[in-house]
Image: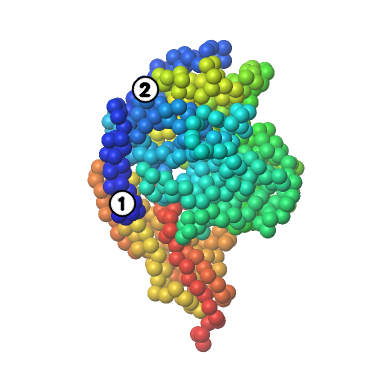
Amino acid sequence: MRPDDIDDRTRRNILKLVGGALTAGAAGAAVGHPTENTGSPNQQHDHFDGSLHETVGPIDQVGYHSLGGRGRGDADTPHYGGLTELRVQNGYAFVGFITSRGPTPNRGFAILDVSDFTEARNDGAELEFADIDLLGVARDDNDASAVMDVKVTDDANYLVASREPVSALFGSPNTSRNAEGSGTSAGANSIQLYDVSDKSSPQLVSQYDHYALGPHNAYVHNIGGTDYVFAVGYTANLNGLFVYEIDRSTDQLRLVNKWDAGGNATNGEAFQTSGDAHDVTVVDDPVTGRPYVYFGMWSSPGMQVLDATDPTNLRTIGQFPMERAHYVQPAPTLIGGKRVAIAGQETIGVTDGSSGRLYLVDCDGLDETGETNPEIGRGEGKADDGGEFLDMWEWQDPISFGEDYSYYLGPHNADITKEGWVHLSHYHGGVMYLEIVEENGSLTLEEEGSFKPVEPVPEESKMGDPRGFAPLGKFQPFCWCAVESNGLTFMSDINQGVFVAHHNDLAVGSDPIIDIDATHRDAASVFTAGQTANIVLDVDAQVLDGEAVWVRTRVPGEWTVYEAGSPDIRLRDIGFETLAEFETAIGAADDDAGTTTDGQGTRRLFVEAPSSTGSYTFGPIEYTTDPPSDGDGNRQWRKLVGETETNEVVGVSTEP
């Protein structure tokens, strides 16, 4: 039986049993409740002593895994080395390793079952019994490589790993992996595609390694039913984005575009660029429905926004000039009626300066047609080119910290929710909680506490020399990233492992539990110009706690939708496509909590074929539990991978 022949929940339960059997002496997940205080941060204490760092605010640690071995893991069985990026999708957490040595050598990334947390209800009552299980680990035998970033597809069946040589960070290769026959080839700079449908046994299926350095970061996004990878990397004549298509029929990455601040290089054009590309996030814009790329560059112009409607022809539509734009992420919905983003700095050591700033940016000025703004040139933009300053937050200013431990007081990666909460990893600051607050028509960032993760992992398991290893070291805490799921914060601490925290002002159970299947069908797949098609969406949704589900699909812009024939449809013309949103819900919104409701039904729309011959893709189908609202941009939609349909238009109309 192939792994994809059994349902996800059954596979997860099997892997839990297997993982538990493989871990000798495994203990339950350590759950702690750090002391609260209201003290201000102070950089003069011992940064290697975790006992000196206390959580501020109503925040509890509810889960922990040390990454030492399969099954459950506590601080006595740690991962030897360091952790990087973490992602949570479909009840699993995926986390990368920057180093791997000693008892746990040759590791690229790990997969954990965190479904006890992502499926928790009753406002957190179930968290007392929640556990994390380590299901599988991918090998990495290249002495020089470090997995700096991991991202997964919407169905969590493919993972993209971004690899850089450790020498890019530490000045020398990580020779402590102790791997027989391993090397330090150019493969240390590569983007890798893994099949992770079997969570206990990740399989490398494709790799692209034509980089001089990087990629440091990448993002996966589904556009028109196809998964694309946007990777930040460097070659001799390109400092920007490499765009790949994931071909699921062959399990291969296919390079389709290169882009830097000077434009696209789809046909392999060589051009020298300036600037330091760093990080990328891709989202479907809450206003236009188009895929937008939010791109951070350390040098001018800072934050840039690109339209990726056509991944082979990225178009600059806005920017926000700032120094050291390290990480940029937009809110998934409108907040206070505005399209906003956060743009953070990473700080490498300062004297009497800021520890690093997080900007709240008003992005309503982005060109909603997706056309390139001719006034935006390389480094020539102004704030009104798409990003307006709203507010700024920083942990400490002024502050001094030196080159020896140059990253330890700076912010790093963050997540932002539709409710306007920012979960910000802040290296030695732990996880900072910020809330976007609307008052008197203005949006501001308000600090709402910080979580300082501390577990007694052995000193020898941490990165670096006895007192640290510049620029990264044995600090405790030392957080790489924080992401939100189901009202909880999941974070990777470089030296300690994976933590789960709950801020008591956030409701656990905010993510819907839905098992949904939806497909397109119609009476034919080939049409002539002007012919009418009846597109039917068959929907089968199992929803918990009486959630109501709404669906929509994407209609090619060349096709005409008959509103009269589809009375419950709300249409949004976004230029290249029409979003057809069905306003009648599937499921019952008033069922008792704790019950599961089967919602089945069909949704229909009538469309007219265009005059142009060609292939046209409908979909993918998307769903939401957010009810219809008067304003666009206030609903968070999720895509069903693979739920598309392609129709052919041939010849001219035969009607009289």
Residue identifier under label 1: 7
Residue drawn at x 24%, y 46% as measured from the top left: 595
Dot 1: what SS?
loop
Helix, strand or loop status at disc 2: loop
Residue at 34 percent of width and 60 percent of height = 539
Which residue is nearer to you in this view: 421 or 213? 213
Residue 427, how many percent across, how many down? 53, 26
Q: Earlier in the sequence, mark 1 or mark 2?
A: 1
> Residue reaching furthest top?
45
Position of 130 relative to 477 (above/below): below
For residue 198, the mark is none
Label 1 to label 2: alpha-carbon separation: 34 Å
Report x, y in % for residue 449: 47, 24
Amino acid beneath label 1: Asp
Q: Which residue is mark 2?
A: 76
Say which of 593 and 528 sits in front.
528
Quarter of the image with the N terminus in it? bottom left
Kindly identify the residue that appears in the image at 55 percent across and 68 percent down.
Answer: 558
Mark nearer the viewer, 1 or 2: 2
Q: Is residue 72 above or below residue 568?
A: above
Of residues 111 and 454, which is closer to you in this image? 111
Please indicate, yes or no, whether residue 151 appears anywhere in the rendered image: yes
Q: Quadrant of residue 185?
A: top right
On screen, residue 132 above or below 258: above
Whether residue 482 sits left or right of residue 537 in the image: it is: right
